[in-house]
Amino acid sequence: MKICVIGTGYVGLVAGAGFADMGHDVTCCDIDGERFAALKRGEVPIYEPGLDKLIAHNVEESRLAFHHRHGRGRDRRRGGGAGRGHPAGARRLG
Ligand SMILES: NC(=O)c1ccc[n+]([C@@H]2O[C@H](COP(=O)([O-])OP(=O)(O)OC[C@H]3O[C@@H](n4cnc5c(N)ncnc54)[C@H](O)[C@@H]3O)[C@@H](O)[C@H]2O)c1
């Protein structure tokens, strides 16, 4: 299944990595450019034991990708939702 996760905070990043490790094709989106850049460099912006290895493995297997999306609602901080389908034109990392 193709899954788009909006927000790469504690909820979104853990969910996205978990879905990818289950075999789904996951794109995680975030409007925070610094967070996106860190993920692109292979850095995990939150502390969750083992998450770095899970993310690296699934990026390498092309099941997990990150997309920088500008959008409204930055100050509301409502990330961590799992949506359906891929956003058009999503860029893959790795
Ligand atoms: N962390 C928990 O244990 C927990 C538990 C229950 C509910 N929640 C809820 O889940 C949601 C996410 O929690 P969290 O801890 O992951 O938050 P977080 O602040 O760690 O991460 C949210 C992420 O969403 C991104 N974001 C915000 N608006 C966006 C948008 N419009 N498009 C794309 N990305 C956007 C932010 O840049 C940020 O990286 C919140 O609404 C929170 O209240 C969290």
Image (cartoon, rainbow, N blue to C red):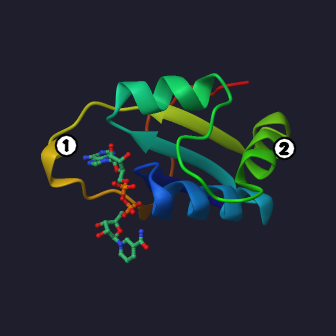
Please determine whether, in this image, residue 65 is positioned above or below residue 1: above
- Measured along the vertical axis of the image, is residue 47 above or below residue 67? below
The answer to whether one can see residue 12 in this image is yes
Residue 60 point in image, percent of width and height? 83, 35
Q: Residues within 10 Å of mark 1 (few under 14, many from 20)?
A: few
Three-letter amino acid code at the position of disc 2: His
**Label 1: element kind:** helix
Looking at the image, which residue is at 61% across and 40% down? 44
| Residue appearing at x 64%, y 32% in the figure | 43
In three-dimensional space, the C-alpha distance between marks 1 and 2, rounded to whole angstroms, equals 29 Å
Residue 50 x/y as whole percent: 77, 56
User: Which residue does the numbered mark 1 point to in the structure image?
Assistant: 74
Q: Position of residue 82 (x, y in %)?
A: 45, 64
Give the residue type that dot 1 points to.
Arg
Precedes in sequence: disc 1 or disc 2: 2
Q: In the rendered image, which residue does mark 2 sit on?
A: 57
In the image, the residue with mark 1 has its CB under 8 Å from the nearest atom of ligand 1: yes
**Is the shortest distance between ligand 1 and the CB of mark 2 under 8 Å?**
no
Whereabouts is ligand 1, in terms of quadrant? Answer: bottom left
